[in-house]
Image: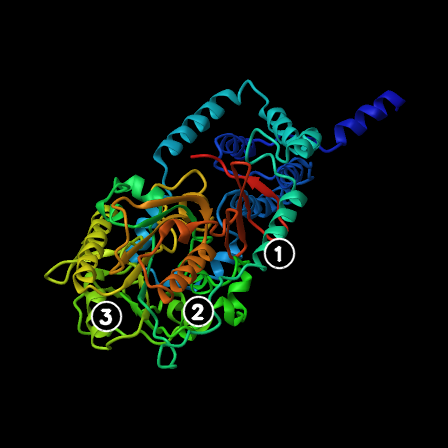
Amino acid sequence: MTQTDTGKAALASAPLWRGLGHWNLYFLVKLLLLWQGYLNLQPLPNLALAAFLLLPLPGRWLPRLRLLTALPLALALLYQDSWLPPFSRLLAQPGVADFTWAYLLELAGRFINWQLLGGLLIVVVAYLYLQLWIRFTTFTLAGLGWLALQPLVNQDEASANLVATPAPAVQVAPAVSLDEQLQRFYRTQQTLTARFPASAGASVAGTPAEAPFDLLLLNVCSLSWDDLDEAGLKHHPLFARMDLIFDRFNSATSYSGPAAIRLLRAGCGQGSHQSLFEPAQKQCLLMDKLRDLGFGTDMALNHNGRFDDFLGEVQHQGGLGQPVVDLQQMSRYLLGFDGAPVRRDGEVLNRWWQQRLQQGEGGRVLYYNTVSLHDGNRRVLPDGDTRRASYRQRAEQLFADIEQFFDRLEQSGRRVVVVLVPEHGANLHGDRMQIAGMRELPVPAITHVPVGVKVFGMDIAGSEPLHLEQTSSYSALAELVARLYRQQTGAGTAPDLNALVANLPSTQWVAENAGTVVMQQQGRTFVKLEENGNWLPYPAK
C-alpha cells in the first residue's frame, strides 16, 4: 500500500465531525432571546456545551449516552442563563409552598408570553426550512465566539466609562469598581444615626415628660409609584392630603420581612441584607428609641403574620411585641394569597384607635402592617365564595379606608403624625426580566415607593404637600421623627416643615434581597445576582 493510500485509509477511518444538527436551534433561540434582552447568556458555558456536542464519538451507544447527558445540562444552562433566581434561592423559600392553588395557576399563566411564543414559532419554522441549504453550525459557533470575545474587546472602553455597552446581557460593569462603591456605601451608612435625645426630658414637676404626639407607621405591602401609574391612581386625593411627600424614597428591598425590619431599624443607616438578621445596636431600633422618649409602642396587622414568619421577624429583629388588635371577631375582607383571611384596613385601624382613646394621655407609636394589596388576594363574597379582585379595586378601598381614618383623627383634635411607608411595590406589569408579580430583583420600579407624612392637631401651615425630591430612605424618616420630637417638646409651636426636611440624609440607591443586589450609578441600574458574580446593566422596559 502506498503512502497516499495509507493516508486516505487513515482519513476514512477518522471520526466524522458532524455539525450541531438540531442543537443549532437551541443555541440560535438563546442568541435571539439574548438580543431581545430575555436572557443573560453566558458565552463560555454555552461554548463548552457546543464543543461537547460537536466532539465525534465512535459507535452508536456513546452518541446516545451523550444525548442523555446533554439534555439535562442544556436545561440547567438555560435556567442559569435566564433572569430567574438561583435554584438554591427557590429552595430556600418554603413560603411558596403555602400559596393557594388558584394563585399558583395564576402565576404559571403569567409565564406565557404569547407574542414571544409566536416569534419563536416563526424561528423554528424558518430554521427547519433553511437547514437544507445553510450550515447553521458555523453561525452558531461564530455568534457564541463573538460573545465570548466581547469582554476583551471592550475592556479599555469599560475601564474608561465604568460600564460597557451595548447589549445588557453581554456586557458587564467592572465588578471591582461597583463592588468598591457598594462597600464604600456600607461604610458610610454605618456612621449614620438619627439624632434622637438620649431620653425624655423632664416636665415642670420633675417627672419624665410624656411623648408630645402619637406616631402611626402604616407599612403597606405592594405599593410603588410604578404600580400607582399602572393602576391610574398616581394622583389619588389621598396624596393631596399629605403634608410631606418623599418623591424618591427607596424601600431598599422587595420583600416584606426585610422591608419591615429596615423600617424598624431606621435609627441607623442602611446595612446589607445579611445584617438585618444579626443583632442590632440599641440606637438602631426605632421602637426602643421611642420607648426611651416616653412613647408606648403597639403593633397591629390585618393578617395573621404567619407567612414566611413575618410576625416572628418583626418581633425578634425589630423590637415589637404581640399585636394589640384581636382579628378573630372581624369579618373576612379578602382571602390571602396563602389562603389566610385578610381583614379590612379601616376596621383594624378604627379598632386600634378606639383602644388608643381609652388609654388617655401620653404618646403612642403604632406599627401597622397591611397585605391588602398583595398579589393573589381574592375578595370574599357574602356567600363565602371568592372572586378575583383587581389591584385598582383593592387600592381604592385601602385609600378610602385611610382617608376615612384621617377624618376620625382630624375630628379628634389630638396631635397625631401618620407616616405612610410602603414595604415595596407589586410589580404590576413586570418587565423582560421578571413576570408581573415577581419581585426577586429589587429594581427601582419595585422599590421606588410613595412615602407621605400627615400631621394632625398641630396647625401646620400650607394646603399643598411639600415634596422632598432627593433620594431618601429609612434614615431620613427616623431623622424627621427625631426633629419633630425636638420641635414639639420645645416651644410646642406648629411644625416647621422646611426646617424638618432641611439636609435630611440622602441615600444612594441600593436595594437588596438574599443573594441579589441592585444599585444605580450615573443614571443606570445594575444588578448582581450572586455574591461573586458580575454586575449586569438592567435593561429598560
Q: Which residue is mark 1?
A: 187
Give the Cα distance between marks 2 and 1: 22 Å
* Three-letter code, disc 2: Gly
For label 1, the crowd category at 10 Å Cα-Cα, with few meaning under 14, some 14 to 19 and many 20 or more, is: some
Mark 3 and mark 2 residues within 8 Å of each other at the beta carbon: no
Quarter of the image where one finds residue 213: bottom left
Give the secondary structure at mark 1: helix
> Which residue is pictured at 46% across the width and 66% down the height?
196
> Which residue is pictured at 69% across the width and 36% down the height?
56
Give the Cα distance between marks 3 and 2: 20 Å
Residue 507, horizontal then vertical, whole percent: 51, 49
Q: Nearer the viewer, residue 539 or 194?
A: 194
> Which residue is pictured at 41% across the width and 29% down the height?
121
Q: Which residue is mark 3?
A: 352
Which corner quadrant holds the C terminus?
A: top left
Q: Which residue is mark 2?
A: 318
Quarter of the image where one finds residue 436: top left
Residue 495, horizontal then vertical, whole percent: 33, 56
Residue 217, horizontal then vertical, whole percent: 34, 62
Marks 3 and 2, the one that precedes in the sequence: 2
Q: Residue furthest left?
A: 383
